[in-house]
Amino acid sequence: MHRQTLQSLADLILIPAMLMLAAAPGLTAQVVTNGGFESSGTGDITATGTRGWVVVVAGGIAPPPVFEVVGDTVEEGNRALKVTVHGLGTNQWDIQVVADSLRVTPGATYNYSLWAKAGRAGATVNLTIGNYAYAEYGALRPVTLSAAWQKFTMQFTVADTSRFIRGPIHFYGTADTGNSIYIDNLQIVDVNAARKPVIVEAEGGDRGSNFPARQDGDVTYVGVSTAPPGAGNPGDTTRLITYRVVFPDSGAYNLFARVRVDSTSGSFFYGDGFGMKTAALDADWIAVDGLATAGFSAPDAVVDGPGALGTGVWKWVNLTRNAYQGARGSPFTVTAGSLARTLQIGGGKRGLAIDKLAFGKAGLFFTVGALENDRAGVADTGAIYKGPPLAAGQSRFLGCAYDMPDNAFAHYWTQLTVANAGKFGSVAGSTDTTQWHWGGADAAYAYAGSNHLPFKYHNLIWGQQQPGWISGLDSAQQAAYIETWIRLVGQRYAGADLVDVVNEPLDGHNPPDGGGSPPRANYERALGGKGATGWDWVITAFTLARKYLPGAGLLINDFGIVNDNAATTSYLQIITLLKQRGLIDGIGVQGHRFELESADTNTIKSNLDRLAATGLPVYISELDLGNLGNAGIANDNQQLQLYQKIFPVLWRHPGVRGITVWGYVEDQMWQSTCFLLRLDGTARPALLWMAQYVKDNPVSVTARDARVPAGFALEQNFPNPFNPATTISYDLPKTSYVKIVIYDVLGRAVATLADGVRAANRYTITWNAPAAASGVYFCRMNAHGADNAGDFHAVKKLLLLR
């Protein structure tokens, strides 16, 4: 997102829009005003923009573009935006339409989705989101459009204290000229709020005179005093209540009610779908009866089936999922362009009290506690997998990244990585450390602990998604904040098993060097810059991590490695420097769709071999596979083929210690087609295949493969004899200083393989001796705990044969 020439115009439009939005009641998780252009009339909007949107065109573009709201080409609803580009500017941002005055919560994470197409395939646009200081939280750049509607998605976190942000769309490609581009249904939805129930207080609607409000202690409820004149409908408007319900997101919703039955009778009606109903028309209503032996009240009870509670108690019932002596209703459908809907209920037989109504996303299940305490729902209990985890009993984990673990997570996975919520930019919204947002990472850490899952913190240092304020500080201030950041992570998550210390450091990836467009964070110099090694800043970061997270396995992490020989070579240069200093305990290799979907499996295996030859365990850190190019509607067969091609190479490699998929639930992943579990709780074919493959190809468990060994040990090298390389494994039962040296028969040291502090773990190192002469050598290990207790010494004899 870039500064444009018409800043004063944008400011003039912004101020009243912000004031109007700040005063508006009923704000929802969907933060875009008029995202589907349904509140706009058709016609040209070039000069003024339209509700919720600002048009910005730099001077000198001739002929100028035309922005218009149309009704003849839409993805959903009755309106869409059509942009016809005639001439281009000199910058990518010279022609743009901006979703303006988007009200957000600092530190919150949002899902961004937008539908777009072009009159002629090949047009390119930039989709961006960020604050009014032109710092981006996320971008899809460039997006190439086809002649069919496509959905584009990303996830971002408000990484500063901004409460109003903006979403520009840039039109700049040469294929845009003379072309028409269509935009529809922009949604920016709070990932947590969209999963929470929408609560409706029963007395809060427009009540007919025969549907009075009553009181039961601190509960205000509604109920009728007389029976309806007809058996299949409420009878007349005096027995109706009308509600206006504002939904946080589009989609299908189930309807719940909190009720109390005071006798064996008691009934009511609800409208068959949204909208105003005819009181005396049976076809407009769903009858609900027989609630005297139905419902749930225990906080952990899932409100899904009919239930079996009796009379005289407040309880929840799921109206959509059950037919209570009447027809079963259908889920209520909410479209992106109509988030405010009308619901009506009608009075039935006497003896029923109604306290609340609630809508919850279909495909999620809700406990009583979730409905009463505004908590998110999780995958549908009717299809939820009950375990055991896919890799249970195996020596390498199959884990998942997830910020808000649901009740199903531990049924599938044997490791948890905190994802977006753990990043510096997500946590540090301001320079005031007392205001940092730890809630998401805390929840994931607590979930991992209570379910006995290895926990990885992702990540400490990364050029992207950094605090917006840090680049404005001098190097000394930056260094102080970075050390504070790592120290606080170490204090708060002292039990973390693994930590991604530096993420995407390779040149041209995402180091914190101030490069890129928009620019990345610029604190590389604060960590020592490139220095004599070329990677001093990485070494400094790992030194700080070793100091403040002494019990964690320290990892480096990057993308585009195993599919690229040159990238693997560059990666190994950094790894060697860290290994020489005893600062690294494992190698992270991202496994995103865009890296692996076209990769040669022989190249992947060869580069895994090269990484494993360091003696460090390799972790596949961010696996997601779906549609080629992540384009179109999720294709089960395409995803299955990719998993069948790629996953065995990763799982069966002896150097790989664990695989972490980068999310698994539909609508909760940054690569929208890569989900493994549908919202209704059913598994896609790729997940079913992967479960069976892991079961059929187990990795055996031995005592020495456990994460924390029982005692110190130095294993015999393998192979032995060897030429020219051999591997040596050793165990540390606790964080220890360890030194491993190779000596010849004259007692001369010829190689030092380890010299420094290591976390408790089992390690494998390699001695490569291409220049050493044939003969006998000795490997000596000296170790003691970080508390200087428990000295250990061992020697093994090695035989090198040329």
Image: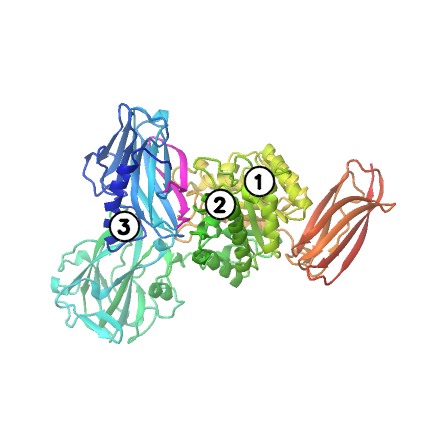
* Amino acid type of the residue that numbered disc 3 sits on in the rendered structure: Val
Regarding mark 1 in the picture, which secondary structure is present there?
Answer: loop
Please identify, in this view, whether the residue under mark 3 or under mark 2 is nearer the observer.
3
* Amino acid type of the residue that numbered disc 2 sits on in the rendered structure: Ala
Point out residue 483 in the picture as x, y percentages from the top left corner. 55, 52
On the image, which quarter does residue 15 sit in? top left
In the picture shown, does residue 479 fall above or below 265?
Answer: above
Total tally of numbered discs in the picture: 3
* Image side of residue 487 versus residue 175, left or right: right
Point out residue 801 in the picture as x, y percentages from the top left corner. 83, 39
Residue at 76% of width from left, 55% of height from top? 782
What residue would you read off at disc 3? 334
Q: Is-magenta flag for residue 134? A: yes
CA gap, disc 3 and disc 2: 30 Å
* Image side of residue 187 versus residue 743, left or right: left
In primary-sequence order, the first of circles 3 and 1 is 3
Res. 631 mark: none
